[in-house]
Image (tube, rainbow, N blue to C red):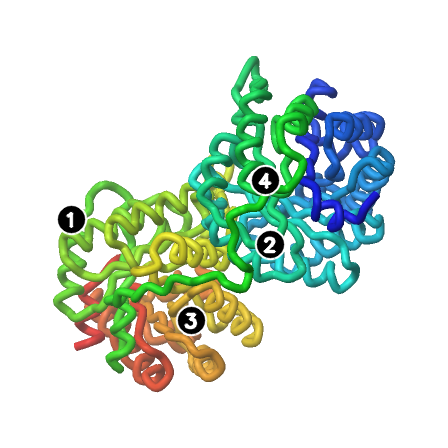
Amino acid sequence: MLNIREYLKNNRLIMDGAMGTYYSDLEGDESAFSEFGNINRPEIIEKIHSDYINAGAKLIRTNSFATSIEALGVTVFEQKRIIEASCEIAKRAAKDKAYVAGDIGPIKENAESTESEILDEYIRMCDIFLAADVDVILFETFSDMIYIKQLVKYIRSKKDVFIMTNFCLNKNGFTRNGLSATKILSELAQIDEIDACGFNCGIGSGHMSNIMKKLKYPSNKYIACIPNAGYPEQMQNRMIFMDNVDYFSNNMKAIADLGIDIVGGCCGTRPTYIKKLAEKIDLKPVKKVSFLGSDIAEVHKELRKNVFYSKFETGKKVIAVELDPPFDADYEKLVEYAHTLKKQGVDIITMADSPMGRSRVDSILMSVKLANETGINVMPHICCRDKNMIAIRSTLLGAYINDIRDLLLVTGDPVPSESRRLTTGVFDYNSIQLMNFVKEMNQEHFADEPFYYGGALNPTMGKIDNIIDRIQKKIDAGCKYFLTQPVYSDDAIERLAEIKRRVDTKILCGIMPLVSYRNANFMKNEFIGIDIPDNIVARYRPEMSKEEGEETGAKIARELMEKLNPIVDGYYFMLPFNRVSLIGKILG
């Protein structure tokens, strides 16, 4: 057979259809993982490959899409065995009739995932495919580019294998992480190591056709389009893709006529789909509407000034105050507090997102209420605990159209242990991943007036080099400023000074004025991550009056501010029990 690059110069390449749904049909088990079939039912997997080749496919994917350790619940050794078997079966079926693509799907990320661990697993998978001498390494159904650039450079440093990258879109033409089809093609055009790129899965051929018609394509890449058969329906407790072969093939002909180089099918497509597709489309490539990979024009819009962030430019210390939303619908007191804080010259109110994992009024809705009632700047917290990315995207869009422009993005406190039987934390993402998502939304939707968002910083937790590394990752993800945990000790202040010397960013130092002996002991002993020295607790007495306790807390706060004044850009006050009267005692 010709080298795949030579083949594509004069031929349109037809890919296979879905492995997973066809395997489920043959096995009669909708929940079956086809990847285990590489070991347990190799004859079925080989039959599926052969059926697609006989239907007209010239490129088949190894049965390895969901072979991450977490997805299959296997060891590294078992993972290697499954992937190696997928290559052996595919190559045996292909012989000299079809090319073989080593198929790599996205590895699921969560709050506990680290980039280095995930990258290492991708590299292990790539090494297995390289050793198996497949014709193509295919990354498909991806939603962001976090690992793609590093992986394709790694692959090309090892071998000059054909590399294809396909992304999963929704009906509006965006990935679940907020990348648009246009942006994807623009960025991939700049990556020399990639031979082909495009879109697969997520949507049916009709929606895919509508999206593809609106795009221009990089002239330096082959373009792939592999949509689903359609959308599954539930029938007798099973999710079934309805048979719509003619509809699919007609849409694929329209897509191919745009000049698309590689076409095939994803979820729900079976050999009948590929056979009809192969019969209907012209196998000779057609010229497409394209742009030069080096000639991608970026539109630079004039940014509207962010009211809160511009306060850093005045040279004055910026003042933020955190309030907790109510547990119930009684919000009048909170509005009253906001009016008081505005009169006292506070620059922004931050609104916690169900702190301690206990349900309160939604932080964004409460922030909108305060902004409308008082006119003060607001910064709702958004944490990753309670929402998946679909819900977070909807939340962000809702916040934006209600004139919210400032956010604090955090991973979030876990669900309390006593509630975990009934309530589950989502934690699909951590704070850095959420920041990258908002960064993409800013570029795609809010370029002329983006969200400005901050991140959390605890200067006392861990080695300072590790803290700075995490800060830098957040800055790279678009983070404009940092709000710290409460600081009390000279050691924490010195660590904060070291961070400020080494990192160019704005920092609001957290100050929590303790208001009683009981409050001081509770915070010292019950809150992980807040370091309260014994000498601070010793300044409180059990017999103190409420007024004496507040005066002591205010005095300590003023002492801390004096020490922090040469270091930080402002202060972030966390008031126990929403006691806004403390601000007047602290600021004077």
Disc 4 + disc 2, Cβ < 8 Å = no
Q: Which of marks 1 and 3 is nearer the N terminus?
A: 1
Disc 4 + disc 3, Cβ < 8 Å = no
Pointer 3 residue: 532
Q: Which of marks 4 and 3 is nearer the N terminus?
A: 4
- State the image coordinates of residue 337 (x, y, percent, origin top left): 17, 58
Instruction: Give the label, 1 or 3, closer to the camera.
Output: 1
Pointer 4 residue: 225
Distance between the alpha carbons at the discs numbered 1 and 4: 55 Å
Judge from the rendering whether residue 519 lies leftward or rightward of residue 499; answer left or right.
Answer: left
Q: What element carries label 3?
A: loop
Distance between the alpha carbons at the discs numbered 1 and 2: 41 Å
Would you call the spot at circle 2 few (<14 residues within 10 Å), some (14-19), or many (20 or more)?
few
Taking the view exactly as shown, the residue that stands out farthest to the top is 236
Given residues 476 and 367, the one toward you in this image is 476
Instruction: Give the label, 1 or 2, closer to the camera.
Output: 2
Q: Which amino acid does label 2 sit on?
A: Ser
Instruction: Give the label, 2 or 3, closer to the camera.
Output: 2
